[in-house]
Image (tube, helix red, strand yellow):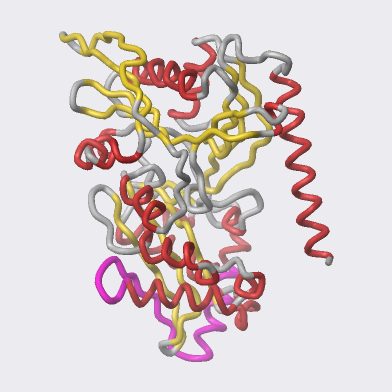
Amino acid sequence: MTARTGLRRVEAQTGERRVRHSVAIVDLAALRAEPQAWDDLVARAVEPHPHFTRHVVEAHRRAGLLRDDCAFVIVRTADRLDAILPFRSGLDITGLGTAVAQPVLSPFMPSSAPLVAGEVFAETLAILVAGLAEASNGRAWRWPLLSISSPVGRALLAALRDAGWTTGIVDSFERPVLDRRPSHDAFLEDHPYKSRLKDLRRRRRRLAEAGAIECVTATEGDALVSAVEDFLALESAGWKGDAGTAMACRPRTLALAHALFAEASGPVTVRADTLSLDGRPLAVSLALIAGGTACLLKTAYDERERALAPGLVLEAEIVRAFHEAAFAERLDSATRAGSALESLYRERETVAEIIAVPPGGEGRLSIDRRVALARFERRAKAEARRLLKRG
């Protein structure tokens, strides 16, 4: 896709100086030519997350999982990037088979919030919204996995409404997150699910009765490589391997695992936690950390020990390390609805799928009709999955 620049320019007051913002649509090659500016935006973002960082996008590109029609809406001031959102266009039921735009996502990008710098935050979002209308050619956006309870999500919805867009919520769920307390004891105090904590301690004791239990963290070098291989082996040996959905089952997702959870550069770091019994891996958790938030993207466990829940025992150990080592300010479960971490993490973030239509873009379909079509599609897919499982 050829870069389109200079779509709209405005000036915003910042302190005693005027700042000229511009919005543009660029391809990946254009962004890759500015690695320092890309990394700098993550460092300045109001809510930095790893999913639209250079490391994650590049990992998808190298694995062949980034679609050819991927492009980016960017906002900038001079040589600084102020906002980034990767997007693609495609035919969709919410447009009755016509094209709609949506953020680029994968199972390893569980959030679709744009990266937005904190300087003149509201003005940057207003310019980004103008770019969204240009990116979709005035058509609708279908926007899954947007945190509507976070500062960026709330401000984005407000900016859309201020610009005359109509929006509707297709579905939402509460994602478990955990903000770090002063200590692990403070985390345990008045925990709403004390019975779950007691159960996890009991399961850990039963595991320890069988041998030496150890929890080890790797962030670089051979230890990280070994932990990733242990994860791939555990996942392949379980039900995902039987179903052909484990990362090692397909060349592209295997390549993504090696690229995504390799030593990262810039503002993203990688963390692998392993729970082992007499040196044998029982569970491995892989996380990406950016801007003080650790996103626990993948966990695999030895399903032969399912009764003792080694995966959840490991998650409890990560929570302990989170407080004792202070490796992040927040843990993001990166899960969908119904996560087992709901009984461990204490905070919630409302994640929604929204439909957003720019002024004049409704045409034959009202926002209510588009939302109804999206809900019908979700029900049909859920029923198809249920029938496949029965089969």
Residue occupying the point 62% across, 83% down: 304
Highlighted magenta segment, given as a residue range: 198-224
Q: How many marks?
A: 0
Residue 179 x %, y %? 42, 46
Placement of the C terminus among the 4 image quadrants: bottom right
On whether residue 351 falls in the magenta region, the answer is: no
Taking depth in this image into account, of 177 and 391 the one nearest to the observer is 391
In screen coordinates, is 351 left or right of 375?
Answer: left
Q: Write down the quadrant of residue 373 in the picture.
A: top right
Please identify the quadrant where the N terminus is shown.
top left
User: Is any atom of residue 294 visible in this view?
Assistant: yes
- Which residue is painted at 49% across and 18% down in the image? 133
Farthest-out residue, front? 2
* Residue 288 at x, y percent in the picture: 37, 55
Which one is nearer the viewer's eye here, 129 or 171?
129
Q: Residue at x 39, y 75 (%)?
A: 215
Q: Is 67 drawn above or below residue 230 in the view shown?
A: above
Residue at the image position 24 percent from the left and 54 percent from the top: 265
Q: Is residue 190 visible?
A: no
**Rendering coords of residue 19 (x, y %):** 22, 13
Judged left or right of residue 303, residue 86 is left
**The residue positioned farthest toward the left in the image shown:** 16
Measuring from the top left, give residue 243's x and y in whole percent.
66, 70
The one of 216 and 130 positioned closer to us in this rendering:
130
Q: Quadrant of residue 261?
A: bottom left
Residue 205 falls inside the magenta stretch: yes
